[in-house]
Image (cartoon, grey):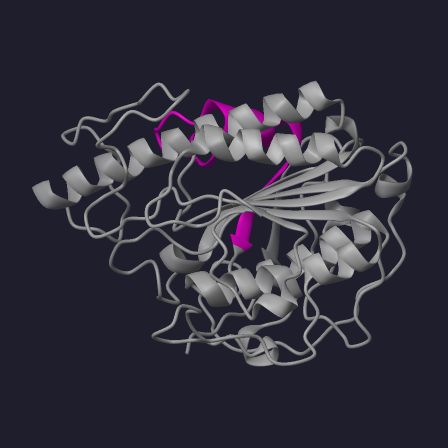
Amino acid sequence: MRRRNLLKGMAGAVAVSATASTAARVVGRQRNVLLLISDDQGLDLGCYGTPIATPRLDRLAGAGTRFSHAFAAVSSCSPSRAVIHTGLYGHQNGMYGLQHDVHHQSLLDGIETLPSMLRRAGYATALVGKKHIGPDKAFPFEAELVPERSGIRDVREMAVAAASFIRSTNDRPFFVTVAYSDPHRAATDYGNDRTWPGVAPVSYDPDKVHIPTHLPDLPEVRRDLAEYYESLSRLDSGVGMLLDLLAESGRAEDTLVVFLSDNGRPFPGAKTNLYAPGLHLPLIVRAPGSGASVNDAMVSWTDIAPTILDWAGVAPPDYALSGTSLIPILGKSGDPARDAVFASHE
């Protein structure tokens, strides 16, 4: 996609510097990473203009850099998560489709991932929640906590598990990925039919919900959106719990926090499509010392792995990555050189 236009294609590889940026170096004793991934969330947060209650993510955006033109490289769960963890497009890393047994898609041999590179550099690594990427040997997390179960949405359990792992790392830097199930739809179920621990449900009137422009104004659509937005408010509560526990641990001022979605909302014309509703997604990055901004540079999920490696001061693989670090443009309003992104779908 070019700015204001929709183009689809592939991009050549671009090398990423192995040197940590100035922003990373000025932080204290550690450069920790907390990567938060929502599931099937479009550009739907209060801070992005959707009239729903997401105060904690809005607060995170107000303390960091909110990217207004951030895009997935593929609008499907497993391949998008593979891009996030490798810094390579799907046609480069080999995960063209979903990882579960009926498809059994996996990374190519020899592809490095964030958990493997950071663990080798001495980081304590953990995955909390959804995995849906493979093979297992390519994702050597030290711990897999609150393992993925059908429909799990207990955001308090996930926050407590992540915080417990962070406290257990002592003086080691940590890389923790928290991969939520919200707001994924299982058939017509968003997990709103029960009370979740620590979460005050936020319900939405179907007659008053915001309808994205790619969807028709029909009663069924309104009801579905009301459930979807309620799931997003629960996600927001969970992120708030986790950030509070991170602050209580004393590690927040040493931690890069990245929040993004894997692909667009689970509606026609969005998820699994290369239209903007499937690819144009939220991205919030809070780096201690970088300041707050809204940045309109066109950035890609191929940029996430280079950003995390740059922050951590960890060398990239011995092959070129497709993205480039966002660390130099955090706290800024844009980057004229970033005027196109690329996406594909198999």
Is residue 338 visible from the viewing direction of this image?
no
Name the foreground residue: 220 vs 175. 175
Residue at 34% across, 29% down: 51
Q: Residue 241 vs residue 233: left or right?
A: right
Q: Residue at x 28, y 48 (%)?
A: 185
- Measured along the vertical axis of the image, is residue 27 above or below residue 2? above
Magenta-drawn stretch contains 304: no
Position of the C terminus by quadrant: bottom left
Report how many numbered discs are placed on residues in the image: 0
Residue found 69% across the figure and 56% down from its top: 336
Query: Which of the 4 quarters of the picture holds residue 82?
Result: bottom right
Q: Quadrant of residue 342?
A: bottom right
Question: Of residues 205 and 210, which is closer to you in this image?
Answer: 205
Q: Which residues are magenta?
A: 46-70
Q: Is residue 140 above or below residue 88?
A: above
Q: Residue 114 location, x and y as percent?
A: 69, 59
Q: Quadrant of residue 121?
A: bottom right
Is residue 246 visible from the viewing direction of this image? yes
Front residue of 236/61: it is 236
In front: 265, or 180? 180
Question: Is 25 displayed left or right of 286 in the figure?
Answer: right
Magenta highlight on residue 62: yes
Q: Position of residue 77 (x, y in %)?
A: 43, 61
Q: In the image, residue 49 lies at what x, y percent?
A: 41, 34
Q: Residue 299, how many percent across, how many down?
A: 61, 56
